[in-house]
Amino acid sequence: MSSAEMLPTSDAGPSAWVVHKFGGSSVADAGCFGRVAAILDSQPDGPLGVVLSACQGVTDALLALVAQAERQEPGIRAGIDVIRARHASIAAATLNADAARRFLEAFDRDGHDIEGILRTVSLTRSAARSVTDLIAGYGELWSTRLFREFFARRQGRTGEVRWVDAREVVVVEWGPLGPGVQWAESRARLTRLVSAGFSGTLIITGFIAADRRGVQTTLGRNGSDFSASIFGALLDAREIHIWTDVDGVLSADPRRVPDAQVIDSMSYNEAMELAYFGAKVIHPQTMAPAVGREIPIWIRNTFAPERAATLICARPSSTLAVKGITTIENIALLNLEGAGMIGVPGTAHRLFGALREGGISVILISQGSSEHSICCAVPLDQSAAAVAAVRAAFARELADGQIQSVGVDSELAILAVVGDGMAGLPGIAAKVFNALGSAGVNVRAIAQGASERNISVVVPGKAATRALRAVHAGFYLSPHTISVGIIGPGTVGRVLLDQMASQCERLRRDFKLELRVRGILSSRKMLLSDRGIELSGWRPELAADGTTADLDRFVEHVDTDYLPNRVIIDCTSSSDVASHYAAWLAAGIHVVTPNKKAGSGDLAAYRALREARRKGGSHYLYEATVGAGLPVIQTLRDLRETGDEITSIEGILSGTLAYLFNVYDGTRAFSDIVREAKARGYTEPDPRDDLSGMDVARKLTILGREMGLPLHLADVRVESLVPAGLESGSVEEFLDRLPPHDATMAARIAEASDRGTVLRYVGRLTAAGAATVGLVACEPRHAFANIALTDNVVRFATSRYDSNPMIVQGPGAGPAVTAGGVFADLLRLAAYLGARL
């Protein structure tokens, strides 16, 4: 407490009094007056203390007049008239004509006094603090006089409505820690003004008080909150209600974390910690009188009194381990470093003594156990003065080389995680740092008090919002939000968007996961949105509102700083798009794709992509490149990571070719089967992309690289089913020219049938790196001979699965299953990033 005089205690316990405080926004105009009166009328019977701030903006306007007078600028009278008009408007709307006239007569007397005082200030060009306090306090006098007259005439509550000038009650003395309340004298004054049996309503001026000489002063920052706490203590109040323009205390700044939630209850200590780090909570000093008597404090919304509120008390019932996450911006990190500091007592004393002498505020301190360096966070605008003060204090050590450097890093921010429930609970710090790491946020310094109530980290200023959102979501205080950009809303992409649309609400409701699609890019158009595209209507919106496709601008939009995690989903088969993966991954953008070009392309580029992923701390997921939605790559990875040795992999890796050779039995022309498959959507737009075998070769190359083989696409021996001479030309030309070659395929199917076998298009890969793709005759009992129309089937022969290889089988073609595989990868990514799925 800032006063040397301790807060007196009372053996009687809390009384029936309840204190309500309404801030400037709550009494901004006549409508607000009516809203406040309705709130008070709804309170249970019993005495009320109602502390009011000045009407919104009035205190600032009065202080502006003082500054204007100090600059000897004209217009003081005009400024007073503006303030008068504001109050006259409220009086006309809330009082009868006679009461309004009396109020304005008193206002005019005050205005005349203010004008005279400021005339003197203008002559001296300087306003003493006592003068500034006197002028600044008029706003509370006017708002409370107005409201007392209005509320008394409503007769909404029983009992007397009495105006109390806090200058006649609250006595303070200013000291180094601010205004100190003289409790004994203040209580005695209140007892003389308000009898023990009073059961009505006191309308009390906030913000102002008097010193022991009777000279008016103010209570400083958040003065009206302080007034409420003081009167709560003086009246032995049962509760204090602070009414403002927000729904209680939020878990984070809602302007930066839109999904911040109201905290149901928190301890005094938690509230103080959050307030210190900039959260919009009652100021720590203003709580002190209530804390001393353990008076519960409610934070409520004047404009929505029915909504949830926050209770600040000694023993909160909330089950949340973390109550709030907040940041302080514009921070610099001062670092004192040198071998000469190790084991030398008094270094820290000299450092912080120098900063104290320089008037530098130290916000956070961090020191390693080696004692080789000490760093502290200071306000950015004080950083130059801080460096100069420390250099001067350690000038001799710097010259002798005992101190190597006094440096400062600018443009930083402090992120603080606060909660009493963190004490003794393992894993809290891990959640903080995992969330920051997943969001690609570098931590510059760390501090944690012995109470374990607060973990503070210093992060780059430009990453502060991203860090705040990531940690907030990490503790499930808001949804895990992932910025999603989808390239290629075609065959697979449009189905993926529809699948996401059907599940987004469930994911948000059940798992607090928000997949925010902020961009859709087609070959010609793109659609961008900050708040997220409504997936139920993306088609007409892209058509109507889409702009010219620009890949760089699209990526820049998806890669926003304020969302902690960003992913690009490439649903194209474009080599050009795939060539950007490495740059995106290096920048911390995750990539999910069914596009096989990057995984099977140039080996050096593939290795560079993997290295970029490691450096960027990002994820590259591509399960759908082989087997669509089947867990082929994950199975292979699990086998290798658990120590199994892969002997060989073989499989039917093309749903299109599986369909063709399941249907084709020689009774119909092969060319007819191909045309039918294209019409049913089982082939690529150009069936030659399937018949060439290159699609299977790419999948085999991807699997080989997963095995650790340095496999090039050119290393795969491929049997193409595209007849010689038909490699070029349009699709229709190819289909028209295919029938003359039916006899060749008919002969092969007949030969296989004569031997009691069936033809299947199979990819094979050995541990030695031998890779082949082509038609294979399979015995009727073979797993490859017994598949459904478009099934993929992959057979893993390993040290463990030798005599009876492991088989993964299921539909491997079609937009729905491929999109499902991509969606599964996206959800897998969300789990990697901390979503609780």
Image (cartoon, rainbow, N blue to C red):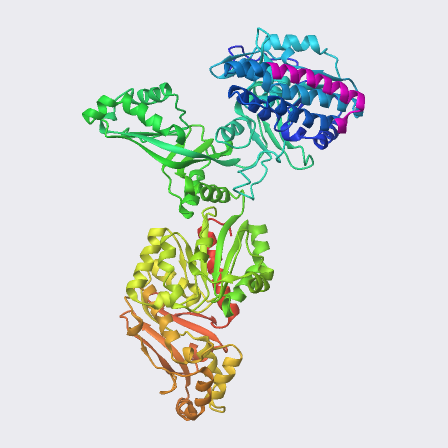
From the top left corner, tell me how far across and down residue 379 is, in percent: 41, 30
Q: In the drawing, does residue 530 fall left or right of residue 737?
A: right
> Does residue 112 appear in this view?
yes
Instruction: Tell which residue pokes out farthest to the top in this image.
Output: 213
Give the magenta range: 92-116
**Magenta stretch contains residue 272:** no
Residue 218 or residue 234, whichever sits in front:
218
User: Would you place residue 467 above or below residue 370 in this image?
Assistant: below
From the top left corner, tell me how far across and down residue 685 is, in percent: 47, 77
User: Would you place residue 808 above or below residue 347 in this image?
Assistant: below
From the top left corner, tell me how far across and down residue 457 is, in percent: 41, 36
User: Would you place residue 579 above or below residue 307 in this image?
Assistant: below
Instruction: Tell which residue pokes out farthest to the left in this image.
Output: 400
**Magenta stretch contains residue 115:** yes
Q: Residue at x 45, y 86 (%)?
A: 733
- Magenta stretch: helix, strand or loop mostly: helix
Residue 254 or residue 592, whichever sits in front:
254
Question: Toward which corner of the image does residue 169 lie, by quadrant?
Answer: top right
From the top left corner, tell me how far across and down residue 518 is, in percent: 51, 55
Instruction: Tell which residue pokes out farthest to the front in this image.
Output: 74
Question: Toward which corner of the image does residue 759 lie, by quadrant?
Answer: bottom left
How many tags in the picture? 0
User: Would you place residue 680 above or below residue 578 in this image?
Assistant: below
Residue 144 or residue 414, whichever sits in front:
144
Q: Residue at x 44, y 44 (%)?
A: 435
Q: In the drawing, does residue 787 fall left or right of residue 641?
A: right
Residue 513 or residue 93, whichever sits in front:
93
Q: Residue at x 63, y 10 (%)?
A: 187
> Does residue 47 appear in this view?
no
